[in-house]
Amino acid sequence: MIPARLQSTRLPNKPLQDLGGAPLIVRVLERVRVSTAFRDVWVATDSDEVVHAVEKAGGQAILTSPDHTSGLDRVAEAARLLSGKSSNMPRGMFEGRVLPDPDAVFVNIQGDEPFVSPEGLDHLVRLMERPDVAMASLAAPFLDRDEVEDPNRVKVVIDRESRALYFSRAPIPSGYGPAAIPLLHIGVYAYRLRTLFELAALPPAPPEAAERLEQLRALWNGIQIHVAVGDYQSTGIDTPDDLARARDQWSKRRSGA
């Protein structure tokens, strides 16, 4: 599931911004389709324009409320629609689908990650094969240590069992070095359906509001997040500067530079 809100505060019309001749949301969709882990890929959005762009590219999109404050809440609404748990679902829209059980896995891939790693997505879904994992995410070592100081690059600290201890926009751990390597959090989450609904029913947590990071709602409420770590570096797009860097990166990849 790829949540996409049209009016981002820092980059208006973000899903429809051009990246290499196609809307950003379409580039994300194309990248996710490279993974072999998914039965279905949907875009969940608050915009008819985004639905049109996705469907024009041969994708599947579902219209959700414009009132959601996080991708998690948007994905939860889309999951309810797809699982037939909402009275708002149009009659026959998903007729013939097998309704998922509470342990079914939904993956939330941020709609501003056009370079997300398909191998990382495969790793994430494999991690969810463990019955003890209710929620999981991705992380990667920083390739550029200067980015550790960038508040738009979210950091995560994990324990020895690769479970998240905390996520922050600040450089963590403080005093990082060879013995405590900073990890870049990649904006991808996998949930059991029951866990997704549980989180969506909870109010935003104080650290979630302070950091503007939805995953802290889980930690605040005692839900463990297992983290798959690998060379899964990705460039998320939050600002006009990020978009310019992404366009440059896209151009270099296409030219083989």
Image (cartoon, rainbow, N blue to C red):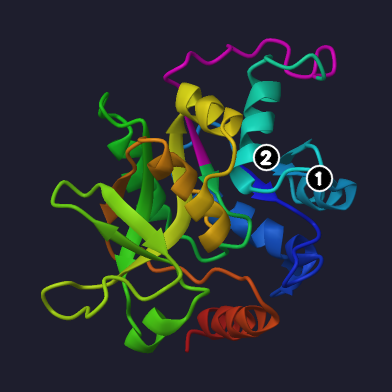
Q: In this figure, which residue is indicated by the disc labeled 2?
A: 74
The residue at the far right in this view is 48
Residue 247's tag is none
The residue at the point 67 percent across, 15 percent down is 85
Q: CA distance from mark 1 to mark 2?
A: 9 Å
The residue at the point 36 percent across, 30 percent down is 134
Task: Give yes or no for residue 96 being in the magenta stretch.
Answer: yes
The residue at the far front in this view is 206
Image location (x, y in percent) of residue 40: 57, 33
**Residue 183, above or below 67:** below
Task: Please indicate whether residue 49 sits to the left or right of residue 117 in the image.
Answer: right
Mark 1–mark 2 CB contact (< 8 Å) = yes
Image location (x, y in percent) of residue 68: 73, 43
Whether residue 236 is visible, yes or no, is yes
Amino acid of disc 2? Arg
Whether residue 42 is visible, yes or no, is no
Boundaries of the magenta span: 89-107
Q: Secondary structure at mark 2?
A: helix
Task: Please indicate whether residue 207 sits to the left or right of residue 57 in the image.
Answer: left
**Residue 37, above or below 110:** above
Which of the 4 quarters of the picture holds residue 168?
bottom left
Q: Secondary structure at mark 1?
A: loop
Q: In this figure, which residue is indicated by the disc labeled 1?
A: 46
Q: Nearer the viewer, residue 150 or 18?
A: 150
The tag earlier along the polypeptide, 1 or 2, is: 1
Image location (x, y in percent) of residue 27: 64, 61
Which of the 4 quarters of the picture holds residue 209?
bottom right
Image location (x, y in percent) of residue 177: 17, 81
Image quarter in which the N terminus is found:
top right
The residue at the point 28 percent across, 61 percent down is 157
Q: Nearer the viewer, residue 203 or 144?
A: 203
Amino acid of disc 1? Asp
